[in-house]
Image (cartoon, helix red, strand yellow):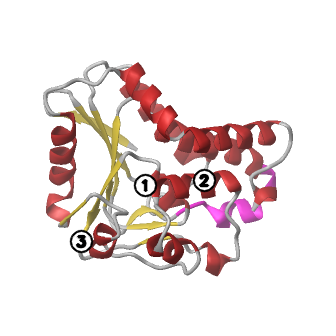
Amino acid sequence: MDLRFCQNNTIAIISMNRGENKLNVEFLNQLNNALDQIERNPSIQVVITTGKGRFYSNGIDLSFYGTNPDKYPEFGKILVATLKRLLVFPILTIAAINGHAFAGGMLLALAHDLRVMRTGHGWMSFNEIYLKIRFPPAMLDLIKCKIPPGPTRLSAIMFGKRFTAEEALISKLVDRSASAENLLAESIRLGQEVCGTEVFDRAMFQHMKSDLYKNTVDALDLMLKQQTSGTSLKSQL
């Protein structure tokens, strides 16, 4: 996972370069290490995550955890903690969705403040209906806090619709769309427009997010407590 800074050290770009970027302990540890470095840098005002090639993230690494069930509890705790961290991160976060964002990959994108999606390639989709996997309550809360009630939420959760960039923009799943060549530039532009000439106080920015998403934060905290007490993520599916 590559981390670089641009725009006079005010924007951090995390390039997730682990193939399909499947969510597992190693991937999430590397992502959190990058977030640690960013938090230590007081100049950063915008964080952008993006993938390379066909995938932003292909969701939970089910093939690995299906054959290594003893590894699942550790993964579950790190996954929930990372989603919560992104949801209330003290700096503006933007997902530059370069390709497919499936299941847990779409959750990862939704945990960001804003999203820009590449046109011409890739879908955002919750394919749990086809995998016959239920959403844990906290994950469902995260989805609900980012997707308002209505046809989009129903299509995403119940019917596993695959949203193109154009459809995701119309449905307000993403804030902008851009070609592959302009994806990062448009994400940087969006971040600069949102921040403007102001520098958000990090503590206050995090408080605002925690207040806005209080029910989801509480649900994620409860899920973490349950996992610590021995209830795994897998048992909640």
Q: Position of residue 106 (x, y in %)?
A: 47, 61
Q: Residues within 10 Å of mark 3 (few under 14, many from 20)?
A: many
User: What is the magenta range?
Assistant: 59-70
- Amino acid bearing label 2: Asp
Residue 123 placement: quadrant: bottom left
Q: Which mark is residue 119?
A: 3
Q: Position of residue 219 (x, y in %)?
A: 67, 44
Q: Is tag 1's residue or tag 2's residue first in the polypeptide sequence?
A: 1
In this rendering, the label closer to the viewer, 2 or 3: 2
Marks 1/2: CA–CA distance: 15 Å
Q: Is residue 101 above or below residue 146?
A: below
- Amino acid bearing label 1: Ala
Please give the residue where the numbered disc 2 appears in the rendered image. 141
In this rendering, the label closer to the viewer, 1 or 2: 2
**Residue at x-position 19% and y-position 47%:** 190
Residue 63 part of the magenta segment: yes
